[in-house]
Amino acid sequence: MVSKRVEGICPSLTLEITAKAKKMKAEGISVIGFGAGEPDFNTPDYINDAAKKAIDIGFTKYTPASGTVELKKAVCDKFLKDNNLVYKPEQIVISSGAKSSIYHALAALINEGDQVILPTPFWLTYPELIKLCGGEVVYIHAGEESGYKITAQQLDNAINDKTKCLILNTPNNPTGAVYSEEEIREIAKVCEKHGIYVLSDEIYEKLVYADEKHFSIASCSDYMKEHTVIVNGMSKTYAMTGWRIGYIAAPTDIAKAVSSMQSHTTSNACSIAQYASTEALTSPEGDKFIGEMQQIFDQRRKFMVDYLKNIKGIVCVEPKGAFYVFVNVSSYYGKSYDGKVINGSLSFAENALKLGVAVIPGIAFGDDDCIRLSYAISIEDIKEGLERLDKFITSLK
């Protein structure tokens, strides 16, 4: 019999819907999948070549649990260049993906019964990891009217003597919301006032649009830098999702604790992937690849938003980052498809799949009024998928 803590963990709805779509495709059924949580670009050749070199020179042994010195230095240089933040290598921990980074960081921060504030909509993994670490989730709702962003006042109202940490994800998955520097500074003031930590998930920092700029809350003050754990990684920025390299920048004591945990849980991240990630971060080819990818995502973003705004009954807040659009479809709830009533985002997604379009139900992200659409697919597939979605909606009675 499994433990009560693990028994309460919910499986990923994104993986569930994706698995159904893949099964249909394997059976020869045409499906357009809007569920992608990864760039549809190949890892650049210069990174692949570095991985091949790592194998050729025998860089295939254990590394320090916290990562190679070379990669940690490259991450420090990245923070200085991109965020004007000064970190030492001993404040950086390389992990087997950003999920691993988040889990170990939360485990280092949270005691049993501590409260973690989580704005909704949220990436579906956050509450499960908080619960795994023995924490209690406190949700703050951010709706369409605020652009899916919480306010400093909402945060202030939610904090009590059990509050240990805020999770801040900007650019945001699933909404694409990007907090401005002014908004983040106001949130930082509240955190400093109450003495709480921030876990700042900045994995989509390079994917911002419409003249938005990413701003890290750790940049607000010396206090915030000493009370923030930044989570980032290689997956979204360099199309390296399968390479499984994430990292944190943290106060020295937290970084040391995370490193110690990793030495017993995952040991070190893949040596070959670390070698390739060092090249990814240090080569001048990186900026060119990121710029081209960002431009293509922006074109798709505009196309998708413009199309969705012309579908009657849909409410779509324009995303400013990541590669998702969060769409309110609740006006269709209560209607039927194929004799079955649509009573929420899950049944909406399940029935839409019958017409060959896979979307992710918003209930997985804490907002049952919405669905998430990814534009990490081609323009042609976006157009075809939205046409199918429109056809599905039109057929509801």
Image (tube, grey):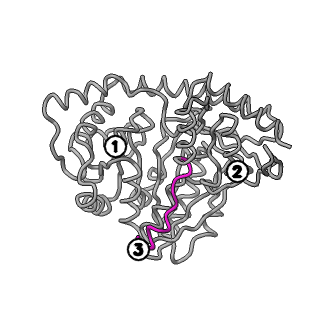
Res. 245 mark: 1
User: Label 3 neighbourhood size at 10 Å, few (<14), some (14-19), many (20+)?
Assistant: some
Q: From which residue to which does the magenta span run?
A: 2-14
Element type at mark 3: loop
The residue that appears at 38% across and 35% down in the rendered structure is: 240
Lower sequence index among marks 1 and 3? 3
**Three-letter amino acid code of the residue under disc 2:** Ser
Percent position of residue 245, x then y: 34, 43
| Foreground pick, 185 / 322 | 322
At 53% across and 68% down in the image, what residue appears?
Answer: 193
Tell me the residue that label 2 is attached to: 347
Q: What x and y, as percent, mark residue 320?
A: 61, 38
Point out the tag, 3 or 2, that comes first from the N-terminus.
Answer: 3
Closer-to-camera residue (351/339): 339
Compute the Cα span from label 3 to label 2.
37 Å
Per the image, the residue denoted by label 3 is: 111
- Callout 2 environment at 10 Å: few (<14), some (14 to 19), or many (20+)? some
Question: What is the number of callouts on the image?
Answer: 3
Q: Is residue 5 magenta?
A: yes
* Residue appearing at x 48%, y 40% in the figure: 205
Q: Quadrant of the N terminus?
A: bottom left
- Amino acid marked by disc 1: Ile
Q: Nearer the viewer, mark 3 or mark 2?
A: 2
